[in-house]
Image: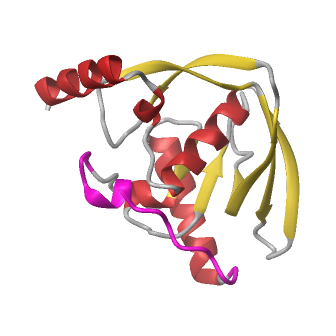
Amino acid sequence: MTVRKCLPWPDKRLRTKAEEVTEITDDIRAIWTDMIDTMEAMPGVGLAGPQIGVMLRLAVVDGSAERGRAVRLANPEILHSSIELREHEEASPNLPGVSAVIKRPRAVTVRYINEEGAVDRRDFVGIEATSVQHQIDHLNGKMYFDNLSKVKRDMLLRKARKLA
C-alpha cells in the first residue's frame, strides 16, 4: 500500500492539463493502485493523477457504500450529461479545510480506457457522477472552486489561506 502525498494548492501542476495515456502498462496499473490507496486514506470518492503530481489523464472513482469497487479510468471523456442537476459538497485534499456546494449534472456517460486497455463506456449517477466530473476537471487543470462565482471563490481561497 502506497499513499502518495497530494500537491498543495497553488502548485502550478494543478492548473496544467494532463497528458493522454497512450498505453495501459504495469506502471499505469501501479499508479492506479497508489491512487486508490491515497483516495482510501483521505478518505475520498475519487482522485486524479495531477493531484499527486502524476501528469497523466488517470483517475479513480469509488462512491460505493462498501468501498473496494474503484473504477480505474484513463483518458476519461464525458459523452453525455443529464439535464437534471445535483448539488453536492465538494472538497479537495489539495486545498484542505474548505469545501463548497457545487451543482453538476446528476448523471453522465463517460468513455475511457479501462485497466485491460480496452475502450469502455459507463453511466455514472449521483455521487459517482459528481466525482468523475470533479476528476475530469482536475485532468483539465481545473479546481472545483472554479465553478463558483468570483465572490464565493475569493472567500473560499481567503479562508483556505487563513487555515494554512
Image position of 11 (left or right of 111): left
Q: Quadrant of residue 33?
A: bottom right
Q: Where is residue 148 in the image (x, y as percent from the top left)?
A: 43, 24
Give the residues in magenta.
Answer: 8-24
Q: Position of residue 75 (x, y in %)?
A: 67, 65
Q: Nearer the viewer, residue 122 or 69?
A: 122
Q: Which residue lies furthest to the front in this view?
A: 150
Q: In this view, does 14 lie above or below 98?
A: below
Q: Which residue is drawn at 85% across and 73% down?
A: 118
Q: Nearer the viewer, residue 121 or 17?
A: 17
Residue 15 painted magenta: yes
The quarter of the image holding the C terminus is top left
Is there any visible trace of residue 117 in the rendered image?
yes
Q: Residue at x 59, y 63 (%)?
A: 58
Image position of 153 (left or right of 56): left
**Total numbered labels:** 0
Image position of 164 (left or right of 122): left
Q: In this view, does 85 lie above or below 130?
A: above
Predominant secondary structure in magenta?
Answer: loop
Q: Which residue is drawn at 44% across and 68% down?
A: 54
Q: Residue at x 52, y 36 (%)?
A: 44
Residue 14 painted magenta: yes
Q: Where is residue 42 in the image (x, y as percent from the top left)?
A: 43, 38
Q: Position of residue 110 (x, y in %)?
A: 79, 50
Q: Is residue 24 above or below residue 105?
A: below
Chosen colour scheme = secondary structure
Is there any visible trace of residue 4 in the rendered image?
no
